[in-house]
Amino acid sequence: MQGSVFKEFSERTQSFLQVKTEVFFKINQLQEVFMKKFLGILGIILFIFGCGSNIKPEDHEALKNKNGELEKALAEKQKESETLQEEINQLKLQMQKISDEKTALENELKSEKETYSANMAEMQGKMEENEKLYSQNALKNPNISKNQEEIDKKNKEVESLKKDMNQLKDSLSKSLNEQKKLLADEIAKLKSQLKENEAKTQEALNKSKSVESQAEAIKKQIQEKEAMMNELNQKIAKLAEEGEKKLKEKDEEISKINQVYTQLVDELKQEIDKKEITITKLKDKLTIQVLNQVVFASGKASVTKEGEKVLQSVAKILQDVKDKQIFVEGHTDDLPIVSSIASQFPTNWELSAARAISVVRFFQNQGIDPKLLAAVGYGEFKPIVPNDTMENRKLNRRVEIVLLPMINKTEESTSEERSDTKKNEPIEKEKIEKLIENQKLEKNN
């Protein structure tokens, strides 16, 4: 009975040591796998942090894919962390089971020991009782001494059995103490290792939470950049629409200028052939140059009868022009004002300005909206040819009628807003280009 208990205790001890070895191996294996996976996700996070804070439209999809990979990797790490925690819990349960089995085995051994002691006490009592009965019977019946030799032999066998049992008891007690000490040491080591692993696992979980927080920050940053890209796309679409509208308006203005040009050429063909009038057009600008001799007498600022006929032909066509600013510019040669008119026109400026004003008033009288008219005198300071010959001076003495597109306050405001937008756009564009460049460098490395 005692031998079978000792054998069972030894077998359970060996089983516990084997389970303990497997537990240590499994914990180390799980730690190694977890650290590899954690380093993998940490590498992904560090890669994304090296990408900067800006995105180009054409590489935006790549960054979104990178964010998807990050979220997938985080999900896998969380799942692995939960699996690791579950396995640690299983190890705790297994440790508790082993500890319970150890306690049960100790209780069973204690019970066997108590039973053994009780049996020994009972046997000792019976032996003493037998000796007492033997002595009493020997006195009553002298013939009983014949069996003394056999009784002594049995007593020796009993003493030998008692000795063997005491030796077994001592050996079992010694072995039990040694096994208990060994088990206690191994359990203490296993608990220490388990505690250390729990601390490492908690640290890894904390790092995983930090990585998740960083990923959320990156995701928020991507959303902000997406909003910025949408805003930029809206601005680009608006500018494209405005540009298309302006282009259409320019085409219409050029078409109108061409129409006016054709009408003027047809109407003033005779004067053009005489080179008294020159008509030029450049995109949406039309310039009519009229020599002073056609419109004004020498030293005078009032329009002549012949000049009125020419200007009337021009006014007839300009009456239909409602969306152009009409500038009348007076020009002279570089000869100084003669003394006879110096009191009225001290310099060529006054003379050129007075002639421009006379043409403007004539156009107003012909029904042209005065809001479209403006007069300016340049004197001799804007010649079209050098004033070195009489023929050149004749060409420089002129009145120019210039048609230009009108610029209203709304267009000026829109132009200012567009200018502000263009000032801001390069900053955002520069940020995005810098982000993409950093991302490409990271990929190459």
Image: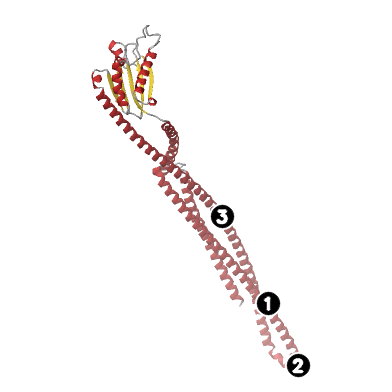
- Residue at position x 71%, y 90% from top? 145
- Residue at position x 28%, y 29% from top? 259
Would you call the spot at circle 1 few (<14 residues within 10 Å), some (14-19), or many (20 or more)?
few
Q: Is there a contact, CB below 8 Å, between mark 2 and mark 3?
A: no
- The tag on residue 117 is 1
- The tag on residue 202 is 3
Q: Nearer the viewer, residue 394 or 316?
A: 316
Split into 4 quadrants, where in the image is the C terminus?
top left
- The reply to whether residue 303 is visible in this rendering is yes
The amino acid on which the numbered mark 1 sits, given as a three-letter code, is Ser
Q: Say if 94 sits above or below 108 in the image.
A: above
- Residue at position x 38%, y 16% from top? 354
The amino acid on which the numbered mark 2 sits, given as a three-letter code, is Lys
Would you call the spot at circle 3 few (<14 residues within 10 Å), some (14-19), or many (20 or more)?
some
Residue lying at the far top in this picture: please name it.
Answer: 339
Helix, strand or loop at label 3? It is helix
Q: Mark 2 or mark 3, which is nearer to you?
A: 3
The amino acid on which the numbered mark 3 sits, given as a three-letter code, is Gln
Q: CA distance from mark 2 to mark 3?
A: 86 Å
Would you call the spot at circle 2 few (<14 residues within 10 Å), some (14-19), or many (20 or more)?
few
Q: Mark 1 or mark 3, which is nearer to you?
A: 3
Quadrant in the picture for residue 88: bottom right
Q: Nearer the viewer, residue 138 or 438?
A: 438
Helix, strand or loop at label 1? It is helix
Chain-order first, disc 2 or disc 1 = 1
Chain-order first, disc 2 or disc 3 = 2
Q: Mark 2 or mark 1, which is nearer to you?
A: 1
Q: Say if 265 sits above or below 68 in the image.
A: above
Quadrant in the picture for residue 20: bottom right
Q: Position of residue 81 (x, y in %)?
A: 51, 57
Q: Position of residue 221 (x, y in %)?
A: 48, 45
Q: Say if 126 sits above or below 191 in the image.
A: below
